[in-house]
Image (cartoon, rainbow, N blue to C red):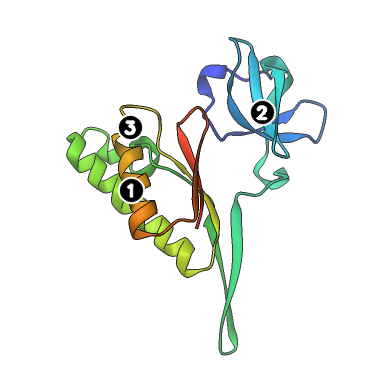
Amino acid sequence: MAINFLELWIGDRLRVIGTKTIGTFEGMDSQSVAILKINFIKQKFHIDHLEFAPEESLSEPDISDIICSEGKNIKKIRLDKIIDLHIENLNPDYSNQIPDRILSYQIKSFEKFITDHKSLGSDHVVIIHGKGDGILRQQVHELLKYKFKARMLQLIHEDGATEVWL
């Protein structure tokens, strides 16, 4: 069954139909050609040749498994390496709030995400902030540089996300 390109989000995992090839959706080249990032290389595919990748078959997992030992108990902590700061994904109940309240919630969620990753030794994450007016992106970048002392930032996905090396 073909994918409706209007349902796709940057970062969705897609599989080429009839193969085990899985990539990350990067955007559309035209109305029927999707751009996928497969093993760090961008490739183009007709949308009719793509399907959503099942969770269990992801070739590039976007979680880090970190094991913390506390005496005899071993705890496995799984953190997503990607956070999407669109309010619809963070907390749909906030969708109708005033912009300042939404921004505050997004920043608090972002800070918790980075703090959790830094405390567990993660060194690479992706922040999806969207294109918009750039207010959220600007605040995220300032916090990454000055509060969290990120080693490197790189805008990706046509400036809708930032790749971060902590």
Q: Is residue 88 above or below residue 118?
A: above
The disc, 3 or 2, on the residue closer to the chain's N-terminal end is 2
Q: Is residue 92 visible?
A: no
The residue singled out by tag 2 in the image is: 36
The disc, 2 or 1, on the residue closer to the chain's N-terminal end is 2
| Distance CA(mark 3)–CA(mark 2) | 25 Å
| Distance CA(mark 2)–CA(mark 1) | 30 Å
Q: Residue at x 33, y 32 (%)?
A: 134
Q: Are marks 2 and 1 in contact (CB under 8 Å)?
A: no
Image location of residue 23, percent across then percent down: 69, 34
The amino acid pointed to by label 1 is: Glu
Image location of residue 136, percent across then percent down: 31, 39
Q: Nearer the viewer, residue 104 or 47?
A: 104
Q: Are marks 3 and 1 in contact (CB under 8 Å)?
A: no
- The residue tagged with tag 3: helix, strand or loop? loop
Residue 81, which numbered label?
none
- The residue tagged with tag 2: helix, strand or loop? strand
Circle 2 or circle 1, nearest the eye: 1
The residue singled out by tag 3 in the image is: 134
Image location of residue 108, percent across then percent down: 29, 53
Left of 66 or right of it: where is 151? left
Residue 142, which numbered label?
1
The amino acid pointed to by label 3 is: Gly
